[in-house]
Amino acid sequence: MTILYYSPGAASMLVHWLLIDLGIDHELRELDFDQRQQKSAEYLALNPAGVVPTLVLDGRPMTEAAAIALHLAEQHPQARLVPAHGDPARRDCLQWMFHLAQSVQSLFRIWWYPHEVAGAGNSDTAREHVRPRIEAAWERIDAHLAGNGPCLLGTEPCVADFYLVMLMRWSRNMPRPATEWPHLAALAQRMKARPSFAAMYAAEGLEEWA
């Protein structure tokens, strides 16, 4: 049994979307963040960081959305979501995955939880400083898509495109969301047209940014 511990719209969304897109049978177990279920002793035994996602495969928990996404893509080569070993495009895919995890998603942590790095009294200042860094990331990625797109690796989507679109969704209520960049907006439209996106949205009860 493949079990995904998730919270609607959180980083677990990437894994959930891929499970559906790849046709992997799975069971969903939602964690109520308002009730701090992600910090329960039972869940911490699976994921000591107390965050989502956690994917239980063959009885073993796996954490970190980017790592899980890569693993799923590699285990299902027929979907062609990650280039094979020996393909020069593979290094580009890995580079994008690490860039999104380290240089983009980490910035959103500051945007959503500014008090963690700046203290409660400096939350607005923290957001003011991180916002241009997020927008600069969109600018760089949009420029890449303009010259190499419509997807990150060219004509066909890879696992990093799923990741990128999830992060774009997170910007939807920011002063300048990612979709204000034309090539990013086109990529989001293309990826959201996949039946798996609608299925994932329905399963998580999401409506905004559909």
Image (tube, rainbow, N blue to C red):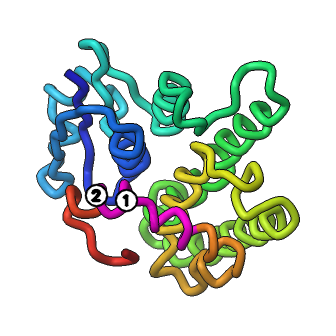
Q: Is 198 in the magenta?
A: yes
In front of the other: 28 or 105: 28
Judge depth for marks 2 and 1 and give the one in front: 1
Residue for point 49% across, 71% down = 123
From what the image shows, is residue 208 above or below residue 192?
below
Residue for point 80% across, 65% down = 140
Question: In the rendered structure, which amino acid carries the disc numbered 1?
Answer: Pro
In front of the other: 142 or 124: 142
Q: Is 44 in the magenta?
A: no
In front of the other: 76 or 204: 76
Dot 2 and dot 1 residues touching (CB under 8 Å): yes
SS label for mark 1 = helix
Question: In the rendered structure, which amino acid carries the disc numbered 2?
Answer: Ala
Q: Position of residue 59 (x, y in %)?
A: 24, 13
Location of the C terminus by quadrant is: bottom left
Quadrant of the rendered image containing residue 56: top left
Question: Which residues are the magenta region?
Answer: 188-200
Q: Residue furthest right?
A: 147
Secondary structure, magenta segment, majority class: helix
SS label for mark 2 = helix
Q: Position of residue 137 (x, y in %)?
A: 73, 64
